[in-house]
Image (cartoon, rainbow, N blue to C red):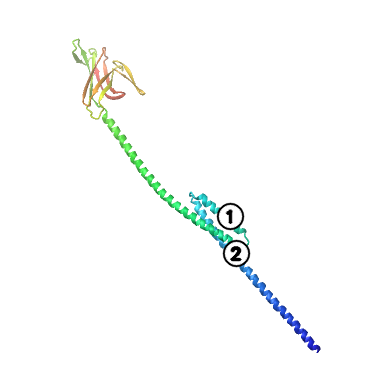
Amino acid sequence: MENQQKNSSLKAIIAVLAVLLVGALVYIFKMTSDTEVVKTELTSSMTEKESVMKDLQELKTTYDAAIAENTSMSDELIQERDKVVNLMDELNRSKGDVSKYRKQASSLQSKMNTLIAENDELKKQNGVLTVQRDSTVTVLGESKKYNEVLVGQNEELSKTVEKASKLTILNTKTSAYKMRSSGKQIETDKASRANVLKVSFTIAENQVAKSGDKTYYVQVIDSKNNVLGDKKTETFGENTLTYSFTTKVKYENKTVNVSEDLPGKDFAKGSYFINIFDNDQLVSKTSFTLR
């Protein structure tokens, strides 16, 4: 009887221990399962965070490249890039659910797509404008060169016309004469007999030259370097000219023979020099000698 009671008690204890063991096993299994769930959730959360951070980093890199191109949209691009940087900072500090950051990143991605598309279109337009500008500059450069050539040709033509329009003085000569009381002139080469010097020259025909009255200044210098005649002085800009007399000619684009007398006395022996000026430009010269 006593042995039966002992067996019953032992069985009861074993039953209780079995129940406790089963409970312990169930508890351990549940705790292990919960740990795995938490671990899985944490791993999933970290993976999602890294994914969002990667997307944000790509957004920032794209914005940096677009900003470096320095277009007129740079300010707006910088503002959006700063929003991405701020969201990256928030994401770094976050400990929990990152789904809200995924939504914000998606919104920033959409905004970036729009801005980059606008920026690319702006670059294309700028490219077209640059080509047009370069083409215009090229055309203007060629036009400038052409105009410079025309200006050069016109200057050369003007010089040619100016040169061609200058009157040519030919056959300049001077002789000494003895003027008799009767008015008859007898040529001489003796200084003691001469009382008139006759200066003559020819203005050649020139259809290009301007017609009208022409004035020439005649300068006669004796062997003692004296200017004979009127000895008047005319100023032409910075130049001055002392001359013996002037002769005025009515020029009508045809050949004109000019002859003028320079009266005098006590002519010196030696060489005489005759210069003819059109204003201050020497246009002809000759010389002769009295003995």
Spatial separation of the CA atoms under disc 1 and disc 2: 19 Å
Q: Residue at x 60, y 65 (%)?
A: 45
Element on which disc 1 rests: helix
Kind of element beneath mark 2:
helix
Q: Estimate the x, y position of residue 88 in percent, counting from the top left.
A: 58, 57
- 26 or 175, nearer to the observer: 26
Q: Decide if residue 184 is on the left or right side of residue 225.
A: left
Q: Position of residue 252 (x, y in %)?
A: 22, 25
> Which callout, 1 or 2, points at the residue further toward the start of the chain?
2
Give the label on residue 289, or none: none
Taking the spot 63% from the left edge, 68% from the top edge, the residue there is 39
Q: Circles 1 and 2: CB distance less than 8 Å? A: no
Residue bearing the label numbered 2: 46
From this view, report whether residue 69 is shown above or below residue 164. below
Residue type, mark 1 in image: Asn
If the image is split into quadrants, where does the N terminus sit?
Answer: bottom right
